[in-house]
């Protein structure tokens, strides 16, 4: 249906351009309209005298009208055919060449959700870890990577419950299976803070207020704890190995990992909602 509407639209556009650019076309259309108008007048006049003229006369009038249309098509057949091909071919080629994917923000992950993990999500309600001392977020290493982190919210209660339970399960698996202790750097983010970060440039974020899942409690930035200190730097091989494992575990729980973006954000995960077409 959509393809048909697009085709009709372009046919109308081509017809209008033909009328505008070619005087012969305008004259031909005017003559055709005048001829049709005359035949319509005759049709109604004959209709008033219908009992007298009978069905044969009416049939002949319709045949003549259709004959005029047929003559018009035959005279301009080549031009109509070229217009039809020119209009239909590009969208048809584009449709056949496309991968039929709509809304890339919601592309289906190639990773399958672990069924055992899915069952865990239905049962035990995990409890957020104790808040870390603010001084951990003001070290030289942290300030070099995230200079405004001290003012970020790390309140688990402001996160969507489904998302927080998935993220807490990620933390649990990372610690028990891979030996990485994790910490949340920033969860919920106010619209004012989002705009402030966006003003700092695309190297920080491309999203303004309400264009990020952070505003809906559906995203968080996380890092690792090693020997009582936060490790954020991607130059640290131990941390980069952790980020790869973190991404795999998060995706197995149905979360989206920022490490697969063009502007990679290894510590970022989000739970995408069908009602929120947003990007970080």
Image (cartoon, helix red, strand yellow):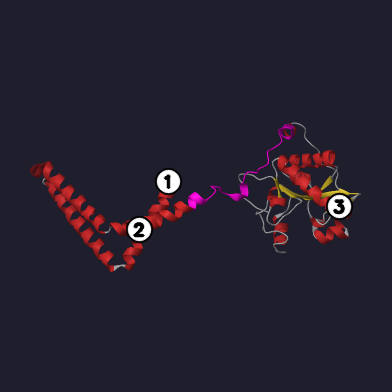
How much space separates mark 3 and mark 1, taking CA atoms?
56 Å
Residue shown at 20% from the left, 59% from the top = 34
How much space separates mark 1 and mark 2, taking CA atoms?
22 Å
Percent from the top left, x then y, of residue 41? 17, 53
Sort mark 1 into few (<14), some (14-19) or many (20+) by Cα contacts within 10 Å: few
Quadrant housing residue 74: bottom left
In the rendered image of this protein, does residue 82 appear above or below residue 101?
A: below
Is 78 positioned to the left or the right of 66 in the image?
right
Visible residue check, residue 50 = no
Q: Label 2: which residue? A: 82
Residue shown at 15% from the left, 44% from the top = 59
**Magenta stretch bounds:** 94-119
Sequence-wise, which precedes: disc 3 or disc 1? 1
Are the residues tagged 3 and 2 within 8 Å (C-beta)? Answer: no
Is 59 positioned to the left or the right of 176 in the image?
left
**SS at mark 3?**
strand
Percent from the top left, x then y, of residue 62? 18, 47
Is 142 positioned to the left or the right of 196 in the image?
right
Quadrant where the C terminus is found in the figure: bottom right
**SS at mark 2?**
helix
Visible residue check, residue 169 = yes
Between 269 and 266, the one lying in front of the other is 266
Sort mark 3 into few (<14), some (14-19) or many (20+) by Cα contacts within 10 Å: many
Direction left: furthest residue: 52
Question: In the image, is residue 103 part of the stretch drawn in magenta?
Answer: yes
Question: In the image, is residue 143 part of the stretch drawn in magenta?
Answer: no
Quadrant housing residue 210: bottom right
Percent from the top left, x then y, of residue 82? 35, 58
Q: Label 3: which residue? A: 230
Sequence-wise, which precedes: disc 1 or disc 2? 1
Q: Label 1: which residue? A: 1
């Amino acid at each position: 249906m959509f393809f048909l509407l697009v085709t009709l639209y372009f046919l109308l556009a081509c017809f209008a351009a033909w009328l505008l650019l070619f005087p012969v076309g305008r004259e031909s259309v005017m003559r055709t309209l005048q001829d049709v108008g005359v035949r319509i007048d005759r049709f109604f006049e004959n209709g008033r005298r219908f009992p007298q003229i009978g069905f044969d006369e009416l049939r002949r009038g319709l045949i003549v009208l259709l004959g005029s249309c047929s003559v018009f098509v035959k005279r301009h057949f080549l031009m109509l055919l070229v217009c039809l091909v020119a209009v239909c071919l590009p969208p048809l080629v584009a449709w056949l060449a496309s991968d039929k994917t709509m809304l890339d923000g919601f592309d289906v992950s190639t990773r399958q959700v672990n069924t055992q993990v899915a069952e865990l999500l239905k049962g035990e309600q995990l409890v957020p870890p104790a808040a870390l001392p603010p001084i951990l977020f003001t070290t030289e290493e942290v300030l070099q990577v995230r200079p405004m982190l001290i003012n970020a919210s790390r309140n688990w209660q402001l996160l969507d419950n489904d998302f927080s339970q998935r993220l807490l399960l990620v933390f649990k698996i990372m610690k028990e299976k891979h030996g990485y202790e994790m910490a949340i750097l920033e969860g919920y983010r106010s619209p004012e803070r989002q705009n402030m970060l966006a003003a700092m440039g695309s190297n920080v974020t491309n999203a303004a207020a309400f264009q990020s899942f952070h505003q809906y409690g559906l995203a968080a930035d996380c890092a690792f704890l090693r020997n009582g200190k936060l490790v954020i730097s991607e130059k640290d091989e131990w941390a980069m190995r952790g980020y790869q494992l973190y991404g795999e575990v998060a995706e197995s729980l149905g979360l989206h990992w920022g490490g697969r973006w063009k502007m990679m954000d290894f510590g970022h995960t989000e739970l995408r909602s069908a009602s929120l077409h947003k990007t970080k």
